[in-house]
Image (spheres, helix red, strand yellow):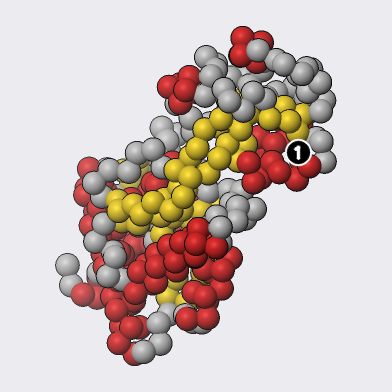
Amino acid sequence: MSIGKFPNLRLLHIFTTVAKYHGYTGAQQELNLTLSAISNYMSELEEKLGFIVCRRGRGGFSLTPKGEAFLQQSLSLLNAAENFERYTASLSGEQSGVMNLGIIDSTVTDPRLPITEAISQFSERFPLVHLNLQIKSPNTLLQGILNNELDVAVGNFSLQGNSVIAHPLYREQHWLYCSNQHELFDVRHPTVAHIAQMRMVTRSYWSQAELGKRGFKHSTASVESMEAQLMLILSGKYVGYLPEHYAFPWVQNQRLRALLPTDYGYQAPFSLIFRRGRSKEILVRSMRDLLRTASKSHKARH
């Protein structure tokens, strides 16, 4: 294949995004392109390559064997191009590019994670860097790190693997809550057996084993975010776990009550993670150091 026929990075980006979403429709929003435009770009890619990378039609979307192999090489090349851009920017003395930071939801009310302080200092240090802040579930954050879609992530991660470096930050306290609309709210001494029979809302990313450790055999509702969990608890039909800092204003207003704190409570260890081999990158290293320093400074003050 001659250089003139080699696919440009834009075509590779479109291809990898289509593969990521398993089709054209899912890739539309991220690419900000119409279906016809995506189809035209994919046809151009295949024409330059001289082989078919994917099948699309009534049978659904699927990569061809050559498409699977080409996808892995495309991802490697795009990652290398991003690293090259960062390196070139560092040589010029004006660091630019994008910092993709992922955080679990409902951390803005947690004083032990001064995320706004770290972001402020990062933005002052790197005014030309575009900050892309994403709020996701722990599993999605971890996958984003593994796929190099995120540079740094903060949250509670149960499984990390050898490809991820983790720096412990602190432990987040969770209690089991019911609302003032719930039948248990005015029960002075509810029993464990009584509470265990209540309708419980859980996080969709919790395994059955994790649910069991929290005192319940099954749940009757699931959510992706703390805000959704709070909504269901406030409805008066469910009990559920919330971070202490997030529930505090509602407890103060007597809208929420923690149930049997000595029996129902746990601490979620929070850590900062990034992909192994990226610690020397200036943006990753700087965000890591700022978050760790901010967290340690809070501990020292309290």
Image coordinates for residue 154, horizontal then vertical, percent = 46, 53
Residue 86 screen position, x and y as percent: 34, 76
Q: Is residue 192 left or right of residue 255?
A: left
- Residue that carries the numbered disc 1 in the rendered image: 251
Q: Can you tell which quarter of the image residue 9 is in?
A: bottom left
Can residue 39 be seen?
no
Q: Nearer the viewer, residue 154 or 109?
A: 109
Above or below for 43 versus 188? below
Q: Position of residue 88 (x, y in %)?
A: 30, 83
Q: Position of residue 146 (x, y in %)?
A: 33, 50
Q: Which residue, as the protein is rendered here, is positioned at the far bottom?
A: 92
Indicate the quadrant where residue 44 lies.
Answer: bottom left
Is disc 1 surrounded by few (<14), some (14 to 19) or many (20+) residues within 10 Å? some
Q: Which image quadrant: the N terminus? A: bottom left
Local SS, label 1: helix
The answer to whether 278 appears left or right of 60 in the picture is left
Q: Residue at x 36, y 89 (%)?
A: 93
Residue at horizontal 48 percent and vertical 30 percent from the top: 206
From the viewer's perspective, is residue 95 above or below residue 50?
A: below
Q: Quadrant of the C terminus?
A: bottom right
The three-letter amino acid code for the residue at tag 1 is Val
From the viewer's perspective, is residue 301 above or below residue 198? below
Residue at x 35% of width, y 83% of height: 89
Residue 119 visible at all: yes
